[in-house]
Amino acid sequence: METVNSLPMERFAILQHKAGSLTNSTPINGDWIEINDFRRLVVLFTAGSSAGALNVSLILESATDAAGTSAQEVRNFAGGSILTNPVMLFSYSTDAQEGAVNRRFYRMLATGNTANATIGSLMLLGFDSHFSPASTRNATGVLISSSST
């Protein structure tokens, strides 16, 4: 899709949103979703209240189908302490996966390194759709204003 004359809301989609309690034994796991029509992905993590120090790693995995067959890690971002970095994000270009046969399914994960719990929110955003406004791929439950300004 041409980005020069597009509206900001047409350039990205909220593909998935997960929230929950995060510890070293309880990660926040996204579901496998197909994203073959996006050029770029962004994983965004926000931390809420915490019982203490917790270092968070954000992980992006790819697979050949929605069941996670042949899953492999494509990006791991050691974000650091939620006490100093309560908001973390990283981007990934899907161009790197174009040569990989059938690697169209992705999922996001957040993992912690201690038993201290935090309430966290994890979002997977898709940018720059190849074929149509990205906003047509928003996850169920995403509410978008219809205003064009």
Image (tube, grey):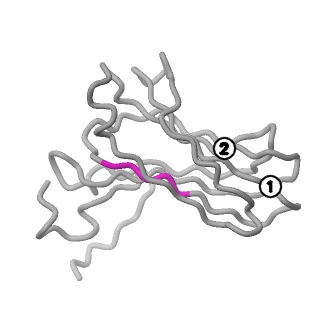
- Which residue appears at 31% of the width and 58% of the height? 12
Spatial distance from mark 2 to mark 1, Cα to Cα?
Answer: 14 Å
- Residue at which label 1 appears: 54
Residue 87 against residue 34 in the figure, above or below: below
- Residue at which label 2 appears: 28
Disc 1 crowd rating (10 Å Cα; few below 14, some 14-19, many 20+) is many
Residue 53 placed where, x, y %? 84, 60
- Tell me the chief SS of the magenta region: strand
Which of the two residues, 135 or 106, is positioned nearer the viewer here?
106
Residue 74 placed where, x, y %? 48, 34
Quarter of the image with the C terminus is bottom left
Residue 76, quarter of picture? top right
Quarter of the image with the N terminus is bottom left
Q: Which residues are magenta?
A: 40-44
Residue 51 placed where, x, y %? 88, 61
CB under 8 Å between discs 2 and 1: no
Residue 7 lies in the magenta stretch: no
- Which residue appears at 80% of the width and 46% of the height? 23
The label number, if any, that marks residue 90 in the structure image:
none
Indicate the secondary structure of the residue bearing disc 2: strand
Q: Is residue 29 left or right of residue 137?
A: right
Residue 52, quarter of picture? bottom right
- Which residue appears at 72% of the width and 65% of the height? 48
Q: Amino acid at mark 1?
A: Leu
